[in-house]
Image (cartoon, helix red, strand yellow):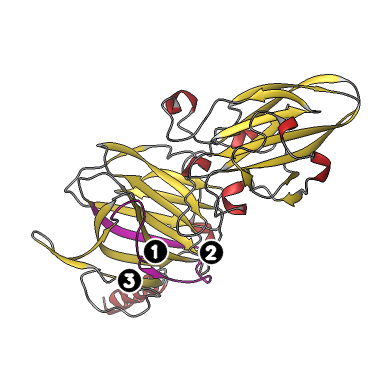
Amino acid sequence: MKRIIGLLMVFILSCHAQENPILFQDPLDDTVVDGWTIPPDHFVDHPAYGKLYKLVCHGDRLDRPTPQVGDESWTTYRIEIEVLVEDKQGFVGLGYHVQNQDDHSCDVHFATWRETTTMQAMGMWGNKKGSFKLYLPSQREIPVTHGQWMRLRVDVGTDIANVYHEDVCVYTVYHLPYTCGGFRFWASYNGSAYFRNLVITQLDTGDIEPQLDDPWQHVLKLNVIRDWQITELKPATDARSGLDEALNLADETFKDVKTDDRGVVNLSAIYPNYSQHSVLAQTTIPSETDKTIRAFVTYTDRFTLYCNDQLVFQGPDRNWYNDNRQQYGNSRLIPDQFEVELSLHKGNNTLMVRSEVMEEFGWGFWMRTE
């Protein structure tokens, strides 16, 4: 019997030793906890739940930095937290893979004015620019009951993140702009919520496998155009009525840009201080014969495509503040959204894109050929 008890104790201790180490934890009840880069400083006495951390955004943007913890050594980890959203309009969420410079991060959040909603993901480039239009919403909707606590969990990897609501995966986020970094809270547009019981646990790389399908997977290995050159930022009105209105293209200066792993030209990341601007982008398509091919595009805001100086596509406006946004996919990038015919001649063919941004929330475009 003593031998059995001894072996059992060894087993228990062994299991305990193999548990993933806790990187950080804070009950968020105004207890002083070391380790915060920016500590939480807004605690309130909730009539039912006692002392809690409360994040409130007055207006469109937060007027102060939010609590932040962790650094570039964090690559694969689990965030667990309880959230109680208030019954008012707004966005509240969590930032992960937070970079120390300029508030760059990945983000996952939810809108608090609907009874049922989807989670949203985005990259952050600077503390004023989100980019949810560059990412599709979550694969599953979740119930958001105002006045009730929700348990959120985010398993963060270098390539993906799985988001869980009450232990059910509702979102697998692919194509993350950053692969390491810390954690912070996030809110905008009058979002408000209480938080408690934050625990961040280190995970092994193999602990994180995608739980839901990638909506971009079917196009990633097709003829995605990844070699683009773009101009510097231009006024939004430049070349709006055609290339002839633009400056002499021979005098334009173009620079090479990298796309993300989907092939998206992410202008939000290249020009994070955009407001209402435009750029020109060009690429070359070689052809061994004269022929007509199909191309497929998606974009935010406004997009015009020329092939060998001929207008071939003038897309409908796809900004968020648009009465027709539901007709065109709620302003988000959607693979293969629009089909275009390109008449190619033998040799090199020049494609020229005019991309105009009308608002915030993300700016970019994507294109492939058949």
Residue 106: image x %, image y %? Answer: 48, 55
Q: Nearer the viewer, mark 3 or mark 1?
A: 1
Check disc 3 and report the residue beneath it.
Answer: 25
Of residue 16 and residue 119, the one placed in the foreground of this image is 119
Label 2: state its secondary structure. loop
For the residue pair 247 and 214, the one nearer the viewer reads as 247
Name the residue beneath numbered marker 1.
Answer: 184
Instruction: Measuring from the top left, give residue 47's x and y in whole percent.
Output: 8, 60
Q: Is residue 71 left or right of residue 34?
A: right
Q: Residue at x 35, y 66 (%)?
A: 64
Mark in the foreground, 2 or 1: 1
Q: Which amino acid type corresponds to the residue marked 1 in the rendered image?
A: Arg
Residue at 67% in and 36% down: 354
Q: Position of residue 290 (x, y in %)?
A: 88, 20
Is residue 11 visible in the rendered image? The answer is no
Tally the marks. Answer: 3
Which residue range is magenta in the image? 58-84
What numbered label is drawn on residue 306? none
> Badge 1, how many Cα within 10 Å: few under 14, some, many 20+?
many
Gap between marks 3 and 1 measured at Cα: 13 Å
Q: Is residue 80 in the magenta section?
A: yes
Find the distance from the CA under tag 2 to the CA under tag 1: 13 Å
Residue bearing the label numbered 2: 180
Gap in angstroms between the C-alphas marked 2 and 3: 19 Å
Q: Quadrant of residue 199?
A: bottom left
Name the amino acid type tagged 3. Answer: Gln
**Is 369 rendered above or below residue 267?**
above
Give the left or right position of residue 234, taking residue 109 as reference.
right
Judge whether residue 220 is colored magenta. Answer: no
